[in-house]
Amino acid sequence: MSFLSNLFAKKEKSVLGVDIGSSSLKVVQLRKEHGKAVLETYGELALGPYGGGEVGQATNLPAEQITETLKDLLREAKVTTNNCGVSIPFARSFLTLVNLPYRASPEEQKTVIELEARKYIPVPLGEVQLDWFIVPKMSPSQNSAEQPVTGGTVEVLLVAVHNDELSLLQKVTTDAGLYSSFYEIEIFSTIRAVVEEHVKPVMVIDVGAASTKTYVVEHGVVALSHSIGTGSQDITRAIAISSNMSIARAEALKKEEGIGGSDTLGSPELVFSRIFSEVRRVLIQYETEHKKSVTSIVFTGGGGVTKELGAYAKSTFSIDVRIADPFTKTEAPAFMRPVLEGIGPEFAVAVGLALRKLEEI
Ligand SMILES: Nc1ncnc2c1ncn2[C@@H]1O[C@H](COP(=O)(O)OP(=O)(O)OP(=O)(O)O)[C@@H](O)[C@H]1O
Ligand SMILES: [Mg+2]
């Protein structure tokens, strides 16, 4: 009897965040201890070499190969739990903030949203999983939410993810021996891990391998989001071409030299100036539509680690710039802090997923 009750009392305390990126897989394992998130292990494995490419380059691998890589990563990182949350790539999801008629009855509101969503989601609703979130209207003092009025409108964040994408992620997760209780669009995971400011609008810039995701977060809600088809792999390619060297050598040089490296033709600064001109467009669009200024920028993603990127962005945008440090939300030995700070931006999504999963415990 006591044996049985002990057995049932033993509760799994560790959780895992799994970020399936275009160039690499990342995992972060946390454990809850006295209400704190203790970092147990983390790891990253590049997908490039599994697809005949190089580290740092984006891939488009079949589910079986992603599964094999994930299994290798779980082993290498000595992951001990199979309870996880998994990210959905922003590129495979659809997100928009719309104004819709307000209904006092939740049932009627649901019907209105589902009917109206058809106008905004560019694919048939039968092909996607639809979700939404009603954005609380803040009072002029910005401290409390106002109740919408009958006959008025509500701001709704519509979110859709293609069924095929969810099936692929489910297959990879299950085949790797994991159990995922949720799939979350990566930008929500990132926000949980890196956005500290809850009132003023903040812009997050996730510089990935294939693309750069940029979005404005206000009151914890995504007010505007945009994907830019240029990422850190384009810097590697530019260096390789202009200096006539291998992708592997160019990748190493990029990490060594940072923003000011290489000659003018293949310079990382040139690629970032292209990314930044699109970021500026998003910034202006937000500020015009919402009549508010973005007060700071937070960089995440592997490209966010680029040396001197912060200073370059500060001189371009003339606002406060921060490089994300998501591991500060976790407890880790002091001697690991410098390492964790250096790799933090790449692990923002995985940390955010693990933090959400911890809330289930
Ligand atoms: N120290 C560094 N300096 C500059 N670039 C770096 C550094 N470390 C990693 N990168 C680059 O960051 C990119 C990988 O970033 P990240 O891991 O965020 O991408 P991903 O999540 O796989 O891609 P995506 O988000 O586009 O799906 C690679 O192109 C890599 O070369
Ligand atoms: Mg990523």
Image: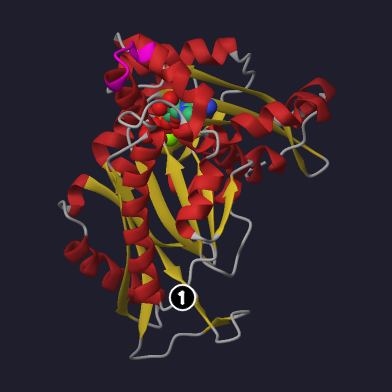
Quadrant in the rendering for residue 52: top left
Examine the rendering and report whether any part of residue 89 can be seen.
no
Residue name at image x 62 percent, y 18 percent = 79
| Residue in front for this viewpoint, 142 or 238 | 238
Residue name at image x 84 percent, y 24 percent = 2
Query: Does 28 appear above or below 63?
Result: below
Location of residue 105 in the rendering, given as x and y in whole percent from the top left corner = 39, 79
Location of residue 93 in the rendering, given as x and y in whole percent from the top left corner = 31, 46
| Residue in front for this viewpoint, 85 or 229 | 229
Q: Quadrant of ligand 2?
A: top left
Quadrant in the rendering for residue 99: bottom left
| Residue in front for this viewpoint, 175 or 108 | 175
Label 1 lies in ligand 1 vicinity (Cβ under 8 Å): no
Query: Does 49 appear above or below 279?
Result: above
> Which residues fall within the magenta stretch?
242-248
Quadrant in the rendering for residue 275: top left
Amino acid at the residue labelled 1: Lys
Examine the rendering and report whether any part of residue 81 can be seen.
yes
Residue name at image x 55 percent, y 46 percent = 311
Identify the residue position indicated by label 1 in the image.
292
Decide if residue 102 is on the left or right side of residue 252.
left
